[in-house]
Image: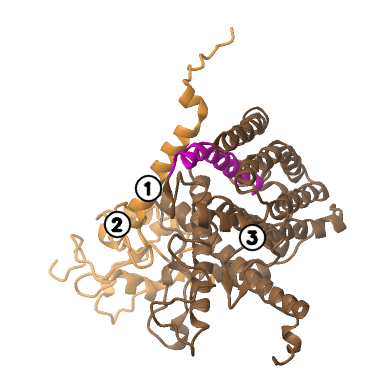
Chain colours: A brown, B orange
Amino acid sequence: MAPPPSFLQQPVVFLVWTSLLKTLFVLFGAVLPIVSLSVFSERKVSAFIQDRVGPNRVGLPTSLLGFRKDLRLAGLGQMIADPIKLLLKENFIPASVNKFYFYIAPKLTMIPPLLVLAVVPFGSTFLGVPMVIANINVGILYVFAVSSLGVYGIVLAGWASNSKYPFLGGIRSSSQMISYELALGLSVVPIFLVCGTLNLSDIVQWQIKHGWLILPFSFTEGFSLSRLVLWGTMMISFIVFVVSMFAETNRTPFDLPEAEQELVGGYHTEYSSMGFALFFLGEYAAMIAGSGVIVTLFLGGWSLPFIPDGSSHWLFGLESHVWSWLPGVFWGLVNITVFFLKVSVILFVFIWVRWTVPRFRYDQLMKLGWIWFFEIALVNIFLAALTLVYLE
Amino acid sequence: MALVVQRPKLNIAERMYLPALLAGLALTFKHLKNTILGRTHVTMQYPEERWDSHLPEWYRGAPTLVADEWGRERCVACQLCEFICPPRAITIHPEEIPSTDKWAKVEKRPKEFEIDMIRCIYCGLCEEVCPEQAIFLRKDYSITGYTRAEMKHNKAKLYEMGGLKTGVVNKWNEKK
């Protein structure tokens, strides 16, 4: 007779503490380091694109320990120096602001992107535990519901600052939201028609079986006419979704609420110190969450072709009965790494696009959202549906 | 009459914006690649790489005092530089050379010679006006200090920076 499960192994308790560990990992092990790394790489990539050097001084101060030179590490110390600078600054609150909303606006901007990450599967399984914090069936609907809340923080910040530029930034943000949100939601409907599920983990599983949605072929099944036909609609979905994601995360060419050159930083003009840092964190966390969703929906999530997942029992012949846990740990780690590598590639594209294209005017954005993307996404749904019916 | 600017007729590809976007991305990626591979000329890395070897002969850096080939200080404390200095950076306290001195016939020398480097504008008028060719603008350009007092170059400092300069002025030569 098997021994009774210990306290930690009871199903509910197990779920709670594993979820807590996963949340801690995603927050402090992934999001915060990636945020500061992407702030650094934003500065570095922008410098390289503009034929400059970028931050290259801050490193390890080894000369304090008696060595002859400081280690520069290509300026990687900037990752730590920037947050420290922001933390140590005075948190100045102007006299004319509405204090309550001024306080909560940065938090409202930062929290939604972190919440989005809860449903994004960032790995297969690790020691038998699925690497997604909340494996819920409404998946992508939850993503849209939560990520749209981020605009409240921006609008509130613009309004509570009681100053003209933040106010204009807040107004632009709301006008921007109503123009891209519809296209964002409608553009992914074809994916659900194809996969038949809203659950993000199941979508990843579908892509492992039938090939990534952005590719016209499947890794296991090879080329087929049906995939080629579906690929057209998927590409349209992909383009509309990615462009809407740029608008959702307030990135150039749709960074109208910030618009440094016109609005002096827009909604966060009046913020300093940690308030500003939270907006910054929120923007970059939104980029990470957005990249995570793009990767999950179109690029096969944590999977790489011909790489087994965490449930595999094979490890180059090293597996044995003594080390039966080893393949699970190894492939689990590989899958998590693959996911974050894909996310960083998308993050690089975000940065790359920012330093390439000029900003849209907001009537242009509205025209793009309402006249082009909304219709394209709508027609695309019918195309996908017709294709699927025909293929049946 | 208002000028009507003719808008160019755009074809479908140009109106779609995407081809132009891709072209732009390719261009910026080329710059990114070239900078990473070191094919782009970037800024001089200042504290490690300096202008020193590129400075021209006529470069106007910090003004200094010079001694001649016999080690005599050239300045005779005529105070012309003090008078011409536009920002009034120079202060000279003259003194008489004692009769026991080898150069007693020169009669006058600066007891204290101060140039306030916070005020100095590196115009070179002092060098131009000096009848004795005693003051020269050398190539030192990063004059820094922690206090205002440190930024005042006194006589010792000025001679240290100036050093020796052999030149055409030799009217105080013994042979004459």
Asked whether A224 or B139 is in front, the reply is A224
Q: Give yes or no for contact between labels 1 and 2 (Cβ–Cβ under 8 Å).
A: no
Q: According to the image, label 3 marks what residue?
A: A120
Q: Secondary structure at mark 3?
A: loop
Q: Main secondary structure of the magenta part?
A: helix
Q: According to the image, label 2 marks what residue?
A: B131
Residue A346 visible somewhere in the drawing: yes
> What quarter of the picture does the C terminus of chain B occupy?
bottom left
Q: Give yes or no for contact between labels 1 and 3 (Cβ–Cβ under 8 Å).
A: no
Q: Are marks 2 and 3 on the same chain?
A: no
The type of residue carrying mark 3 is Val
A244 part of magenta stretch: yes
The type of residue carrying mark 1 is His
Mark 1 Cα-neighbour bin, 10 Å: few <14, some 14–19, many ≥20: some
Please state the chain letter of the residue tagged with numbered disc 3 in the rendered image: A
Q: According to the image, label 1 marks what residue?
A: B31
Residue B83 rendering spot, x and y as whole percentages: 44, 55
Query: Would you say A37 lies left or right of A22 here?
Result: left
Asked whether B147 or A38 is in front, the reply is A38
| Residue range (magenta) | A224-249
Residue B50 rendering spot, x and y as whole percentages: 33, 63
Q: Residue at x 53, y 63 (%)?
A: A340
Q: Residue at x 52, y 78 (%)?
A: A329
Please state the chain letter of the residue tagged with numbered disc 1 in the rendered image: B
Q: Quadrant of residue B28?
A: top left
The type of residue carrying mark 2 is Pro
